[in-house]
Amino acid sequence: MSRRSWPFLLGGLLVALLLAGVVSNYASSHPDGLDSSLLKGCTVNADDEITGGSCPAQQAKNHELADSPLADYGVRGVGNDFLSTGLSGVLGVLLTFAVGGGLFWLARRRTPARAGSTGGVASTGPAGVGPTGPETGAEAGPASAASTGGPGASRSTGDR
């Protein structure tokens, strides 16, 4: 990763942490579209408890992970709702960042090995011409020798 992309990455992470840790506490507590559509046909009180009627929300059950540490947009064991919601958001952002960063790190494009590290001859020009000029048979690597018909050149199957 280039040095120019680090400030952008860290700035994005900071904005995500700020939104998850602080702004998420000011999200609407009223039901969203799915919740309100499931409540159609029922009457609810001020605490959003079903008091009568018939609707799909009456069939709702607790999720298998309802007792998990980060269930219901909060952290279990933290008594302050504002802090619990903010901490849950921050932990979610950090976990997502870590998993995503790890996946990008695994899938990153690796740079090719440098010429001196593999023992091969680097060629930047046409076949038989090295980075400093024309190569002779003794200085030529396997690729340039084969392409110019020099010593060690491979033959095609039609030449045999």
Image (tube, rainbow, N blue to C red):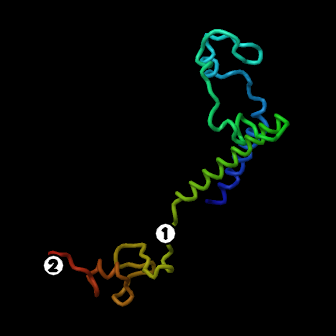
Residues at badges 2 and 1 in contact (C-beta under 8 Å)?
A: no
Identity, as a three-letter code, of the amino acid under mark 1: Pro
Identity, as a three-letter code, of the amino acid under mark 2: Asp
Residue 77 in which image quadrant = top right
The x, y position of residue 16, in whole percent, is 71, 42
> How many other residues sit within 10 Å of disc 2, few (<14), some (14-19) or many (≥20)?
few
> How many other residues sit within 10 Å of disc 1, few (<14), some (14-19) or many (≥20)?
few
Secondary-structure class at tag 1: loop
Q: Residue at x 52, y 64 (%)?
A: 110
Q: Residue at x 68, y 21 (%)?
A: 31
Q: Residue furthest right?
A: 80
Q: Quadrant of the C terminus?
A: bottom left
Residue 66 in which image quadrant = top right
Left of 102 or right of it: where is 48?
Answer: right
The x, y position of residue 84, in whole percent, is 79, 38
Above or below, comparing residue 33 to residue 112 in the picture: above
Residue highlighted by disc 1: 112
- Mark 2 / mark 1, whichever is N-terminal: 1
Left of 69 or right of it: where is 55?
Answer: left
Residue highlighted by disc 2: 159
Left of 144 or right of it: where is 100?
Answer: right
Count numbered badges in the picture: 2
Q: Residue at x 68, y 50 (%)?
A: 8
